[in-house]
Image (cartoon, helix red, strand yellow):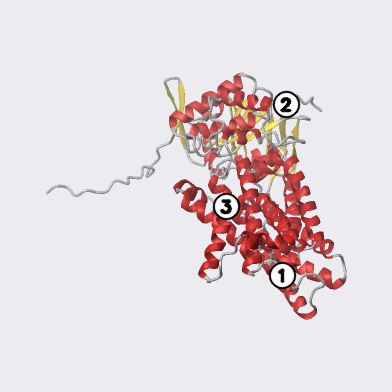
């Protein structure tokens, strides 16, 4: 509802007539749009869910770096002729594990090293795209997300990754929670925190990869952060935060993708804008919500 | 080879971080079932490192830590180290302790009763759905004790359990630890609070990189050991049957911070 209202607002200020119901549902006649909406909704939910762990562990900069690194791997895989998802997936997992092992040992300058390496990977990707192009979606679609670029393969990919992530979170729920809350104690009482970290990084890199097409490399990280922050504002309970964040992510993906089609704007920005509306609503909702937001100082 | 009767033991344990100056040197220590031990020492004396080494979080550079096979331990961190803004309720916090193996994410009916039991034992009845921040200092401390107990731990380690607590709450926590120990729980804690805690415990171990003294407080909390442990002369007084440790007065030791007022003319 919020998204629809906002779309109307934007449309009217741009002096475009507000689309009626038939116009709103019209794009659903196209298979590519349905795929796009499915992928955006599922990716939104997945990012919301995984994002809770990312935000609570102050790892949002890792999500950001990872998406940039994966972009480089994606383009490189295309050029070398390896399967795009396989190539980029392996590259992503490798980068994620490398980052997490660096973070774990925290040598001097590790943050700077992560920043430089992931940004360099992104820059390499951009340079290669401009030189040689890609077989799959074009550079703009990859950077900012595009409803036109979504294929049935993307849909299967996001479903597979979601099942994987749900399985990990379901069976590893308490290990993940304990490690996220209190890593030192968890490890002291016998939780294998190194493994938990590694599995979380693998889930994160697959999530980024599968969500990249609709959300865009540059804005995947925002979708990991915003729904989780809004959910945190609404509750003090971890289990509630998880599902709220997933729901907010899914709604943002759904309405954002629709807005993208009607406004002819890349889907990455519209999805983030819709989730930002949730943030504004929560922020306006009361002092208690705002106070909780202030507890997440590093979420950016 | 002596028979191993202890739950946990350190043999000639030496620990240094990254090959630097050793933080612990040749520490020998054995913890038996039913012990209530306080590890006493100033900041930087290696108390926390000893706890971490006993828990297996820090590797031994030399010597070894032996644990009875299958020993289940609990750990209560310093209150200051806990992220009080983290979104967990009291019940969620307690139940996360059972993190090993495959478990359902949610707290089932039977487990909910167990959570309520352990909360009840620690005087936290009905607080399960509260956020951990919305509790008093003593309650917060007890939630983490409840979490440690929820794993059916045989030994519980507490890192500075009373730092940041007021006198009344400190007494509550001490009483509680005494009761739990009475009921058979083995407890190891670190503290730098001599009068608030150490003198109340059955066994203390004075640590300053190495073990300076270990045993009953009346044998260990004596001026020679305390001076070597804290690097500053101390006296031990008797007061109402309790031992009280005070800084020994030395020349120039009294620092007068009062502002000099002018003599009235």
Q: Nearer the viewer, residue B182 or A269?
A: A269
Residue A90, percent from left and from top? 82, 60
Callout in the foreground (1, 3): 1
Residue lying furthest left:
B265
Residue drawn at x 64%, y 38% as measured from the top left: B51
Label 2 SS: loop
* Inter-mark Cα distance, 2 to 3: 48 Å
Q: Which residue is mark 1?
A: A141
Q: Few, some or many C-alpha atoms within 10 Å of disc 3 (few <14, some 14-19, many ≥20)?
A: many
Residue drawn at x 56%, y 25% as measured from the top left: B122
Residue B43, percent from left and from top? 54, 43
* Inter-mark Cα distance, 2 to 1: 65 Å
Relative height, residue A95 to residue A283 (above, below): below
Give the chain letter at badge 3: A
Q: Earlier in the sequence, mark 1 or mark 3?
A: 1
Q: Few, some or many C-alpha atoms within 10 Å of disc 1 (few <14, some 14-19, many ≥20)?
A: many
Give the chain letter at badge 1: A
Residue drawn at x 17%, y 47% as measured from the top left: B263
Q: Which residue is mark 3?
A: A229
Callout in the foreground (2, 1): 1
Relative height, residue A87 to residue B95 (above, below): below
Give the chain letter at badge 2: B
Asked which quadrant contains residue A279, the reply is bottom right
């Amino acid at each position: 509802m919020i998204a629809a209202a906002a779309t109307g607002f934007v449309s009217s200020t741009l002096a475009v007539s507000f689309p009626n119901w038939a116009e709103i549902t019209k794009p659903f006649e196209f298979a590519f749009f349905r795929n796009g909406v499915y992928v955006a909704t599922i990716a939104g939910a997945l990012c919301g869910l995984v994002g809770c762990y990312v935000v609570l562990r102050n790892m949002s900069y890792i999500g950001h770096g990872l998406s940039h690194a994966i972009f480089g791997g994606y383009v490189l895989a295309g050029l070398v002729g390896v399967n795009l998802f396989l190539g980029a997936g392996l590259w992503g997992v490798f980068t994620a594990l490398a980052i997490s092992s660096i973070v774990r040992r925290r040598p001097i300058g590790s943050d700077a090293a992560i920043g430089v390496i992931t940004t360099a990977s992104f820059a390499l990707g951009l340079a290669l795209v401009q030189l040689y192009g890609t077989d799959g979606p074009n550079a703009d679609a990859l950077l900012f997300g595009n409803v036109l670029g979504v294929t049935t393969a993307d849909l299967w990919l996001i479903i597979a990754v979601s099942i994987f992530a749900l399985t990990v979170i379901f069976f590893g729920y308490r290990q993940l929670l304990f490690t996220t809350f209190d890593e030192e104690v968890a490890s002291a009482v016998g939780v294998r925190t190194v493994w938990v970290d590694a599995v979380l990084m693998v889930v994160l890199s697959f999530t980024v990869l599968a969500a990249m097409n609709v959300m865009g490399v540059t804005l995947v990280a925002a979708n990991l952060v915003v729904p989780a922050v809004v959910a945190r504002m609404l509750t003090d309970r971890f289990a509630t935060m998880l599902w709220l964040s997933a729901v907010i992510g899914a709604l943002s993906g759904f309405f954002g993708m629709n807005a993208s089609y009607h406004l002819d704007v890349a889907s990455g920005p519209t999805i983030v804008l819709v989730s930002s509306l949730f943030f504004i609503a929560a922020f306006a909702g009361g002092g208690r919500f705002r106070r909780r937001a202030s507890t997440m100082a590093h979420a950016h | 080879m002596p028979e191993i009767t202890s739950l946990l033991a350190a043999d000639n344990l030496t620990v240094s971080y990254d090959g630097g100056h050793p933080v612990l040197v040749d520490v020998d220590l054995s913890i038996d079932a039913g012990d209530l031990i306080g590890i006493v020492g100033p900041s930087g004396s290696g108390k926390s490192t000893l706890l971490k080494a006993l828990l297996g979080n820090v590797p031994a550079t030399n010597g070894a830590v032996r644990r009875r096979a299958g020993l289940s331990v609990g750990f209560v961190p310093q209150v200051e180290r806990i992220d009080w803004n983290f979104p967990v309720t009291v019940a969620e916090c307690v139940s996360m302790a059972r993190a090993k193996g495959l478990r359902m994410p949610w707290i089932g009916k039977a487990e909910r009763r167990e959570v309520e039991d352990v909360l009840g034992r620690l005087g936290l009845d009905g607080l399960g759905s509260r956020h951990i921040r919305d509790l008093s200092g003593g309650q917060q401390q007890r939630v983490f004790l409840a979490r440690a107990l929820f794993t059916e731990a045989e030994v519980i380690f507490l890192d500075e359990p009373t730092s940041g607590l007021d006198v009344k709450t400190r007494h509550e926590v001490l009483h509680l630890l005494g009761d739990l120990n009475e009921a058979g729980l083995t407890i190891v804690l670190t503290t730098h609070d001599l009068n608030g805690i150490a003198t109340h415990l059955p066994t203390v171990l004075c640590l300053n990189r190495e073990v300076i003294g270990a045993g009953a407080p009346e044998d260990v909390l004596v001026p020679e050991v305390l001076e070597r442990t804290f690097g500053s002369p101390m006296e031990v007084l008797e007061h109402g049957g309790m031992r009280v440790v005070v800084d020994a007065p030395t020349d120039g030791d009294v620092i007068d911070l009062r502002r000099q007022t002018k003599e009235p003319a």
